[in-house]
Amino acid sequence: MSSIVYEDEDGNIVYSDPKRELHERQKRMPEITGDDYPTYEDSVKQSLKEIAEKAIDKYPNTFKKLSDKTLDRFELEDRIMGSSQIIDDLENLLYLVGDRPEPATEDEIMNSIIGMIEQSHIRHDRLFNTFASLIEQGTIK
């Protein structure tokens, strides 16, 4: 590459060396090591987070936090009763393993168990957050 000569907006003659400019730009960039690159999972999480933030900004009234709602003891009771959903989940798993006409694959069984675990965590979090909100509101002392 050779130098480029041009006139800038103020009428000054400017000499530009693309190789030198590229080298200077590369020196200013931080060195990236293997640990600096995000994993595929991190990239997906970041993308989903950005999509969720845009949706929340676009529809703020649709995405209210649980703590923003006024809760009462009936809401807590519903959450407590919902925690017993695990019994129905286990009955469905029992059907999947023992009573279904075609045998369940190992993947189907594992996916069902993983799903039940995740749903149980979600129900527990909602129940605990409802309880904490009621204490915060002074409904429960």
Image (cartoon, rainbow, N blue to C red):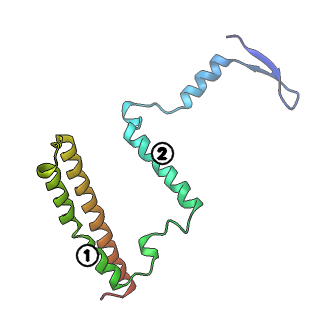
User: Element at badge 1?
Assistant: helix
Query: Which quarter of the figure has residue 77?
Result: bottom left
Q: Is residue 26 left or right of residue 122?
A: right
Q: Is residue 30 left or right of residue 13?
A: left
Q: Are marks 1 and 2 in contact (CB under 8 Å)?
A: no
Relative vertical location of residue 131 with respect to residue 36 in this rendering, above or below: below
Q: Position of residue 39 (x, y in %)?
A: 38, 37
Count of residue discs: 2
Relative vertical location of residue 105 with respect to residue 79 in this rendering, above or below: above
User: Element at badge 2?
Assistant: helix
Badge 1 or badge 2: first in the primary sequence: 2
Query: Which quarter of the figure has residue 81?
Result: bottom left
Residue bearing mark 2: 47
- Of the 4 image quadrants, the one containing the N terminus is top right
Which disc is residue 80 wearing?
1
Q: Position of residue 36 (x, y in %)?
A: 41, 36
Q: Is residue 88 left or right of residue 61?
A: left
Relative vertical location of residue 23 with respect to residue 141 in this rendering, above or below: above
Separation of residues labelled 1 and 2 (CA atoms): 34 Å
Residue type marked 1:
Ile
Relative vertical location of residue 123 with respect to residue 141 in this rendering, above or below: above
The residue sitting at the top extreme is 2
Q: Residues within 10 Å of mark 1 (few under 14, many from 20)?
A: some
Q: 130 or 114: nearer the eye?
A: 114
Q: Residue at coordinates 88% horizontally, 28% vertically from top-left?
A: 11
Observer-side mark, 1 or 2, equals 1
Q: Residue at coordinates 33% horizontally, 83% vertically from top-left?
A: 74
Query: Which quarter of the figure has residue 38?
Result: top left
Residue type marked 2:
Ser
